[in-house]
Amino acid sequence: MLLALCTSACVAQPAAKPAPGVKLSQLADRVRIEINGRLFTEYLTHTTNPSCYPLIGPHGAPMTRNFPLKDVPGEEHDHLHHRSLWYAHGAVNGVDFWTEKPGAGRIVHRGFTALKSGTDFGLLQSTNDWVAADGKTICSDERTLRVFARPDSERLFDFEIKLHASHGELTFGDTKEAAMSLRVAETMRVVKETPKGQPPVPGDGHIVTSEGARDGDAWGKRAAWCDYSGPVNGQTVGIAIFDHPSNPRHPTWWFVREYGLHAANPFGQHAFEKTNDPHSGDLVVPAGKSVTFRYRFYLHEGDEKQSRVAERYADFATTKSR
């Protein structure tokens, strides 16, 4: 009788089915974000600049480069500051918050104002200080990530950032090295890594903008959206970034590179259009005021046509800030 009871008690129970929706779990130095029980990303607060890594797309495809957050064979080790998905700027009141060179500033996580799980979406809100190498705070920001519960065939999230001139007037300088950025997986590159001095070798990835600019021709062009697609684990997937019509200087310029950088940059007019004035793209925020930018990320199967990127952008363009 005792053996029977033990046998019955020791029978493995079926694993509980994950609750549908978006779950946020706060850990010591990050927030883990799961969609329908699957890891989507982690919002990291211990890095030089808060970033999202990894970025898991349709059917579990890892869609951003691992380096420098994880050392994986076969990945190029260029651009230490290309940390998966991030927001930064290379010239804020003259301070470099883009690179991680000596003398560069840091964007310091101060805390969360909201962390909410939900059936339809999850919400993360944080505050950050932009601190120069000498310890002086240049400005602050509020970030809102809204991650939607979507089927496994796609991922969708909004990134809103409000930049505050909290410590005096701000000048976001004209530089190509800014602002809403990610680095795609190595297999998605338009050109492959080659030894220095050798001609580029075509890869399997492609870039296309809402205006029809493709691959290398998309660099520095203005458009409402830009899509970067290519193979990951044997399937074609893509990441589209949408620039909301309410953003200053919409449609934005695209700082997008064939080696894998994918960035929306409304500050680089001189760099992208070769204007005579090196400050033609400067954006000044008076003391005590703020400026807000809104973006949507659409991680999808196939290329921009198969995934109907243009239609999905049209949906986003009609949304209002919440």
Image (cartoon, helix red, strand yellow):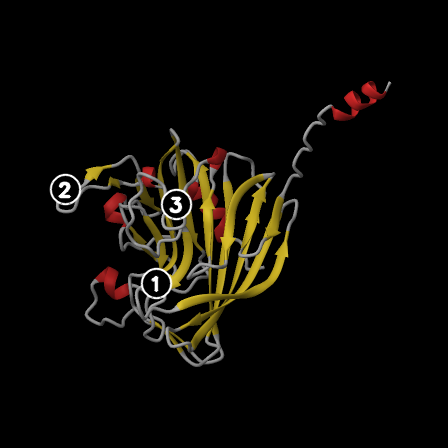
Q: Name the disc covering residue 199, or none.
A: 2
Q: Residue furthest front?
A: 2
Q: For the C terminus, which image quadrant?
A: bottom right
Q: Measuring 50% from the left and 38% from the top, which residue is drawn there?
A: 154
Q: Residue furthest right?
A: 1
Return the x and y of residue 268 as percentages of the image width and height: 29, 63
Q: SS at mark 2?
A: loop
Return the x and y of residue 100 as percentages of the image width and height: 33, 62
Q: Residues within 10 Å of mark 1 (few under 14, many from 20)?
A: many
Q: SS at mark 3?
A: loop
- Mark 1 or 2 closer to N-term? 1
Amino acid type, callout 1: Trp
Write down the quadrant of residue 123 in the picture.
Answer: bottom right
Q: Measuring 67% from the left and 30% from the top, which residue is drawn there?
A: 15
Q: SS at mark 1?
A: loop
Above or below, comparing residue 23 to residue 177 in the picture: above
- Label 1, on which residue? 98
- Mark 2 or 3 closer to N-term? 3
124 or 12: nearer the viewer: 12
Amino acid type, callout 3: Asn
- Label 3, on which residue? 66
Amino acid type, callout 2: Pro
Write down the quadrant of residue 87 in the picture.
Answer: bottom left
- In the displayed structure, does residue 149 sit left or right of residue 316? right
